[in-house]
Image: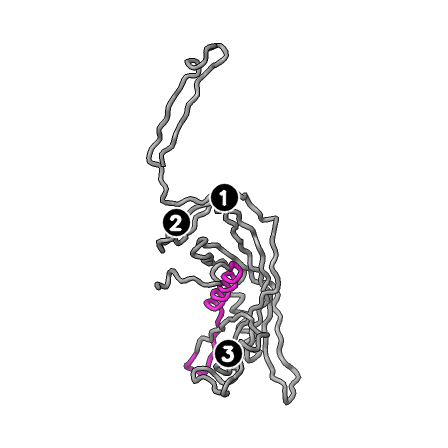
Amino acid sequence: MATYNLKFNKDDSVIRHLIIGLLADLNKKVSFYRQLDNDKRVEVDVPFYYSITGDDNFLRDSFLFSTANGLDCAPEPDKADGNYDKVPRGVLNLTSMTVDPSKLVNKRNVGHYSKMTDQNLLEGYRAEFEMIPITCSVDVEIILSSLLDIFKCTEQLIKKLYKSNQYNVEVGHLNEGIYRISAYYAMPDDYGKENPIEYGFDDKGTYKVTFSLDINSFVPSIDFGTEMKESNRLFGITGTVSDPQEASPNPETQTGSSRNTGLNI
């Protein structure tokens, strides 16, 4: 099967694609430089991940053993024995999602999307739809290794991301329709930092930059009852004109004429 017509359970989740688009945009833009010596200066990328903590079986499968119950206690050779966290790194966590009724627009707009037919062909369709505005609140935490890295990372966030940022995501299932929606987020004015001052023998000091983001986008609601193929074309117009005075015995009660027009599509 070709890669363009694969179907997964996650395809029709708009919120998931919005989070992935935000992760991709942050991964592409957030980095800072570190001077190693007098002649060498390297760029340090800050990868961003979504928070997946809380599932013990997932952590075992991904980081420890080949099976959930740890049969034979034999780790796979291509996986680390234990959980190793990369520093620096950024972690996103979705905290809330709300619908903004003040941004509702006209319901009966015509939208275009692609859908797979029974012959496994990807064809274009159009239908009436309603764009429901949503706001997703996200908490971002960036873990760093020193106070100087906090300063550098915060400065790069301001330089590259302040104030508004826009990205597009392609959402939808092949059986219902694939469409592209836009999303944007704005960087905050305040940034919190956390640096460990007191240490203990069992403590692991971490330096953090924390802030919140609001993703503004839409969830389309398509009226499939108005669906039409984009390949439909208007090839001609035929019509007939009739005079109602000819059909009525009393011409004084009928005035004007009527026109019946038919369309050939």
Relative height, residue 27 to residue 256 (above, below): below
Residue at 50 percent across and 80 percent down: it is 67
Extent of the magenta region: 13-41
- Identified by mark 2, the residue type is Gly
- Identified by mark 1, the residue type is Asn
| In magenta stretch: residue 226 | no
Select label 2 or label 3 by which is in front.
Answer: 3
Upstream in sequence: badge 1 or badge 3? 3
> Where, by quadrant of the figure, is residue 259 drawn?
top left
Query: Where's residue 82, x and y in %?
Result: 52, 84
Residue nearest the viewer, comparing 132 with 259: 259
Give left or right: position of 212 versus 263.
Answer: right
Neighbor class of circle 3 (other Cα within 10 Å; few <14, some 14-19, many 20+) is some
| In magenta stretch: residue 27 | yes
Relative height, residue 39 to residue 175 (above, below): below
Residue nearest the viewer, comparing 89 with 248: 248
Q: Determine which residue is flagged by label 3.
A: 61
> Where, by quadrant of the figure, is residue 189 drawn?
bottom right
Q: Determine which residue is flagged by label 2.
A: 124
Residue at 44 percent across and 21 percent down: it is 258
Query: Where's residue 158, x and y in %?
Result: 54, 66
Query: Where's residue 126, x and y in %?
Result: 43, 46
